[in-house]
Amino acid sequence: MRSIDAPAMLREAGLRVTEPRRAVLEALEGLPHASADAVHARVSRRLPDVSLQTVYNVLHDLTGRGIARSIEPGDHPARYELRVGDNHHHLVCTRCGVIADVDCVVGQAPCLTPDDDHGFAVAEAEVTFWGLCGACQSVESLPSPAHARL
Amino acid sequence: MRSIDAPAMLREAGLRVTEPRRAVLEALEGLPHASADAVHARVSRRLPDVSLQTVYNVLHDLTGRGIARSIEPGDHPARYELRVGDNHHHLVCTRCGVIADVDCVVGQAPCLTPDDDHGFAVAEAEVTFWGLCGACQSVESLPSPAHARL
DNA sequence: GCCGTTCATTTGAAAGAATCAAAAGAAGGA
DNA sequence: TCCTTCTTTTGATTCTTTCAAATGAACGGC
């Protein structure tokens, strides 16, 4: 399991190499589909002084440069992932918000073309499968999901 | 163009027939893909005393009974529509948030089945096409889109 | 190796959508 | 018509995300 080279990724994107940025990248590697909050929590273990605002800034910069991608499932807070540009989609748990990756369902990128584009310049297609994750299927009645927000 | 029978829809769903509810249903008929705010604005023309909170309550009730459906595109506020259960998808404008309907791209509901469901009980598949709508393609540089939020 | 410009980070505040809670009011069956 | 139950209102509050000004650090030139 090869790790990412955070400094190189940052330099290639024309971003300065800073501790908070390295830490956010490494957090995203360890926590796919993490919320800004979760990233912040993970980053704080090593760099306790990094603010949540900084995490938002970094995530914004990373997504802006195409290093990370944000997923914004319905009323759940936004999630972030490093895996980018490989046309995969997501399974989202309606109850706890957990996300799993799904490789493109219909092959390459056929889903990228609606019959009638209504004059839109379509840039991207996003497929989201909604359902209950394994854990939530067994505990459908409990109050608060333990693994939400991670 | 036949109009909806709001009272009947409400009764069939086991909901009491009230003026605010009728008005919200009629607003949704006239404004497909309206935000809660837009629904409220439209409802206010006829019933100025209906609060935004009530609109949220009604929309919540309607979606809970399957009469309406909510669309929650990324960081745009949630939109609501009456058309339900016919497996269609959406084109969303990245800039102004305008939404257009697209009939299911691949036929019936094949998109409803990911290869590997990771133990999820999949209930629904949602396909969102992101792009620029016609209007925003021509005015890509202007500050604030006139038709946003409707 | 130091310095200065430019970019990052912090701090504190604020916006915006949506929800909660308690009290007052209407719907609809007996 | 009355009574119970469901709706609506009012007002406040939560939560995620963004804005802005001031401080601090990165890194390319000297």
Image: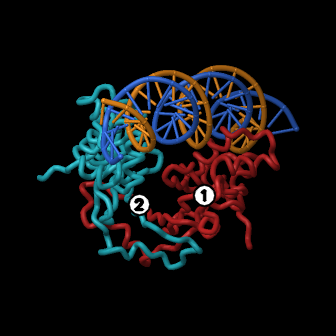
Chain colours: A red, B cyan, C blue, D orange
Q: CA distance from mark 2 to mark 1?
A: 26 Å
Q: Looking at the picture, tell me which residue is in the foreground, A130 or B100.
A: A130
Q: Is residue D3 left or right of residue A71?
A: left
Residue C20, percent from left and from top: 57, 38
Crowding at mark 2 (Cα within 10 Å: few <14, some 14-19, many 20+): some
- Say if B75 sits above or below A67 in the image: above
Give the residue displayed 60% in from the left and 57% down from the top. A96
Point 27% across, 60% down: residue: A117
Quarter of the rendering occupied by the C terminus of chain B:
top left
Location of residue B16 by image quarter: top left
Q: Closer to the N terminus: mark 2 or mark 1? A: 1
Circle 1 is placed at which residue position?
A96
Residue that label 2 marks: A124
Q: Residues within 10 Å of mark 1 (few under 14, many from 20)?
A: some
Chain of the residue displaying label 2: A
The reply, left or right, for residue A59 in relation to residue B78 is: right
Q: Nearer the viewer, mark 2 or mark 1?
A: 1
Tag 1: amino acid: Cys
Q: Amino acid at mark 2?
A: Glu
Tell me if I can see residue B111 in this picture: yes
The image quarter containing residue B12 is bottom left
| Count of residue discs | 2
Residue B140, above or below A66 = above
Residue at the spot 65% in from the left edge and 58% down from the top edge: A142
Q: Position of residue B40 (x, y in %)?
A: 33, 34
- Circle on res. B40: none
* Viewer-closest of D25 and B128: B128
The answer to whether B45 is drawn above or below residue C7 in the figure is: above
Q: Where does residue A113 sit, x and y in percent of width and height?
A: 33, 67
Q: Residue at x 43, y 51 (%)?
A: B73
Pointer 1 indicates a residue of which chain?
A: A
- Residue A148 in the image: x percent, y percent? 65, 55
